[in-house]
């Protein structure tokens, strides 16, 4: 789906300082070489299976299906991966690639901390140095993940600039990369940023839809009617969608964070409230004001609290291949509680946005229809914050 | 002859940078006029952006102060109209691609022409993406300034061959901000540029004062200073213009010596 110049329709591109151009060209050349290298793929697949616990389960949520009384619901359990989220798929791929390129140091941004933890994990495994940039606000919301990263040997740098959240962590990681390129790979955590990142990250995450397809064919002998995933930058969503893009009968639904509502300023729903722009290396949709100043977005979910969306999603939206809906904090929290009580699975608050949408549409669908929800991560990290949202003063 | 060409026709140039609206637009206007009166050859006017990814902490701070003071692109255009009534100095905008794109690039660049802006400097628009704005810039006679970085290596010739106005040579890796020492092999970079084009080049990023500026201008055709000027504004606020004038004079004297 990627054009040679890194475009998805009009989106994507390489809007970055000249200082970084040779670094992304070097990365693209290395990736183009290794993605077809049998040895690289064998190593990666071994890491996926033996280290990250792939393939992740496709679980039939019987109680939830019966309770909602409509479409049959399956959960793609990315929460059962090592480190507790889909982020490890991309990180193992990029860390292995970086190592092959002779890099000895990984830098990364993180929102909820899941990508930072995954990067710190891969760095520990592969004997690489690791520095993670995290918005100061997020280091408070996700204090346990900060400790985890340090435990894994990474240095965590709280970012105080701007809104002190994910977008500022991305900006700071980019600044650090321009400062030190020779030995450093920027392990970007989502399908965003300059080409070739949106393609590389999507390819490493595409294992999710590859497995869903195989597992669904085995379980039901047919493809699902809908695949639902949450979208911040959009890596678990594109991973869940990718192998279904050509299967036009499968509805692809991305769930954005509406925060306190898309009619308020406290939202992070990019497709629903943003417009075309150029930021963080790519052309895509962004939440911004009339003069192009990037909006200080908000969501209860640190992982979806980002003012942009990956360029391939922007393209899928333009051609009406995927639909992007907005889920409020309250709806996501209700889904978080619902899945815990109904299935005994505590999803990440990010993933709960996808669960919330399935709860809306499943009852409206016939019983012979099938929905797959990607549970992108587990929710242990969110318990204290959700308790506080419900008025219980619990701190980690 | 364009104002930028003219600026380089009279020996080594000094290009000071200022973020518009830090701390307010009246101060910016006074500072620009002080720069012009004290020997600046081209002034780089920063249009503030919420997320300036190529800037170090000093200029990031200026961007945020300006935005919280309510500065918008339209207000910066009005400022330039006022400045243009009082000086014929070459003026370039320095901002980020989204500020231009989001305004409507055609409207933005047409306005540049109308109000007398001579060049556009966008640190997040590399060679590969310049077609985004280049046709519009060409149509309006506004130079889209090209960057060469310490990591450009085999890209220098390609960039230099198509560059107009002047080439912005980034002195060091990393973001803007003062450095005590610049270690890049700049003479080598400049010699590759000169082998490929007649377009002049000026060095920026990390230049802290007159002495370093003189050294950088000695290697190239000029020196660009940003953070050191923003520091004066940070400290002196509305009283900064006069001191910026003195600083400009000191730098210009040093690079002409």
Image: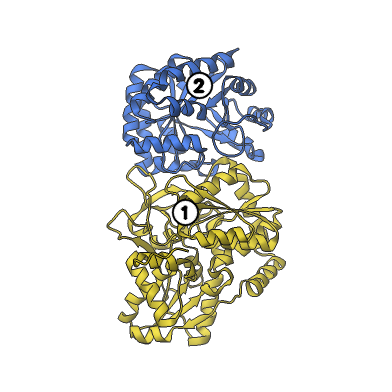
Chain colours: A yellow, B blue
Identify the residue at image location x=52%, y=47%.
Answer: A172
Q: Tell me how far mark 2 sits from mark 1, CA to CA.
A: 43 Å
Label 2: which secondary element: helix
Q: Nearer the viewer, mark 2 or mark 1?
A: 1
Residue position marked by numbered label 1 in the rendering: A166
Q: Residue at x 38, y 62 (%)?
A: A257
The answer to whether residue A129 is seen in the rendering is: yes
Number of residues whose C-alpha sits closer than 10 Å to that of mark 2, classed few (under 14), some (14–19) or many (20 or more): some
Residue toward you, A88 or A335: A335
The residue at the point 37 percent across, 31 percent down is B21
Q: Chain of mark 2?
A: B
Q: Neighbour class for label 1 at 10 Å: few (<14), some, many (≥20)?
A: many
Horizontal and vertical percent position of residue B76: 35, 31
The percent coordinates of residue A331 (x first, y second) are: 33, 69
**What chain letter is assigned to the residue under label 1?**
A
Task: Name the mark on residue B201.
Answer: none
Q: Quadrant of residue A308?
A: bottom left
In depth, the one of A6 and A185 nearer the eye is: A185
């Amino acid at each position: 789906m990627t054009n040679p110049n890194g475009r998805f329709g009009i989106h994507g591109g390489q809007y970055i300082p000249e200082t970084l151009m040779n670094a992304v060209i070097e990365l693209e050349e290395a990736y183009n070489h290794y993605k077809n290298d049998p040895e690289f793929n064998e190593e990666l697949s071994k890491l996926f299976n033996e280290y990250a616990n792939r393939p992740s389960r496709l679980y039939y949520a019987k109680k939830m299906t019966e309770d909602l009384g409509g479409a049959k619901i399956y959960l793609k359990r990315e929460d059962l991966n090592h480190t507790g989220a889909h982020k490890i798929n991309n990180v193992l791929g990029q860390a292995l690639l970086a190592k092959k390129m002779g890099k000895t140091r990984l830098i990364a941004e993180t929102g909820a901390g899941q990508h930072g933890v995954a990067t710190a994990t891969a760095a520990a495994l592969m004997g690489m140095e690791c520095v993670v940039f995290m918005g100061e606000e997020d280091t408070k919301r996700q204090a346990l993940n900060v400790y985890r990263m340090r435990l894994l040997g990474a240095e965590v740098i709280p970012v105080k600039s701007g809104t002190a959240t994910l977008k500022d962590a991305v900006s700071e990681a980019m600044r650090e990369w321009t400062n030190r390129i020779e030995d450093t790979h920027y392990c970007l955590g989502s399908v965003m940023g300059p080409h070739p990142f949106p393609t590389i990250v999507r390819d490493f995450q595409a294992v999710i839809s590859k497995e869903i397809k195989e597992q669904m064919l085995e379980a039901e002998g047919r493809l699902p009617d809908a695949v639902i995933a949450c979208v911040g930058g959009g890596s678990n969503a594109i991973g869940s969608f990718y192998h279904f893009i050509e299967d036009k009968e499968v509805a692809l639904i991305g769930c954005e964070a509406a925060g306190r509502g898309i009619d308020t300023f406290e939202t992070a729903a990019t497709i629903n409230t943003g417009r075309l722009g150029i930021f963080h290396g790519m052309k895509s949709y962004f939440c911004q004001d009339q003069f192009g100043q990037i909006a200080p977005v908000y969501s209860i979910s640190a992982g979806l609290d980002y003012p942009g969306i990956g360029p391939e999603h922007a393209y899928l939206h333009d051609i009406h291949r995927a639909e992007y809906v907005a889920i409020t904090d309250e709806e996501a929290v209700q889904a978080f509680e619902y899945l815990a009580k109904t299935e005994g699975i505590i999803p990440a608050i990010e993933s709960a946005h996808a669960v919330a949408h399935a709860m809306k549409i499943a009852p409206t669908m016939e019983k012979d229809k099938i929905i797959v929800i990607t549970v992108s991560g587990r929710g242990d990290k969110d318990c204290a914050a959700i308790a506080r949202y419900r008025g219980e003063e619990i701190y980690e | 002859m364009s104002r930028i060409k003219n600026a380089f026709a009279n020996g080594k140039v000094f290009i000071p940078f200022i973020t518009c609206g830090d701390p307010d637009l009246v101060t910016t206007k006074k500072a620009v006029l002080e720069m012009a009166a004290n020997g600046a050859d081209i002034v780089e006017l920063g249009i503030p952006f919420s997320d300036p990814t190529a800037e170090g902490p000093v200029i990031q701070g200026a961007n945020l102060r300006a935005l919280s003071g309510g500065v918008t692109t339209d207000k910066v255009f009005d400022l330039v109209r006022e400045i243009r009534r009082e000086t014929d100095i070459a003026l370039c905008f320095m901002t980020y691609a989204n500020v231009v794109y989001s305004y409507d690039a055609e409207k933005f660049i047409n306005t540049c022409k109308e109000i007398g802006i001579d060049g556009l400097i966008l640190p997040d628009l590399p060679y590969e993406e310049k077609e985004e704005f280049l046709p519009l810039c060409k149509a309006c006679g506004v130079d889209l300034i090209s960057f060469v970085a310490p990591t450009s290596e085999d890209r220098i010739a390609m960039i230099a061959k198509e560059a107009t106005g002047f080439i912005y040579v980034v002195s060091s890796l990393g973001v803007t901000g003062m450095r005590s020492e610049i270690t890049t092999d700049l003479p080598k970079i400049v010699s590759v540029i000169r082998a490929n084009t007649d377009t002049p080049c000026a060095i920026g990023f990390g230049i802290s004062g007159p002495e370093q500026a003189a050294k950088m201008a000695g290697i190239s055709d000029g020196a660009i200073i940003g953070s050191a000027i923003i520091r004066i504004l940070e400290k002196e606020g509305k009283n900064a213009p006069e001191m910026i004038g003195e600083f400009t004079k000191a730098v210009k004297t040093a690079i002409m010596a």
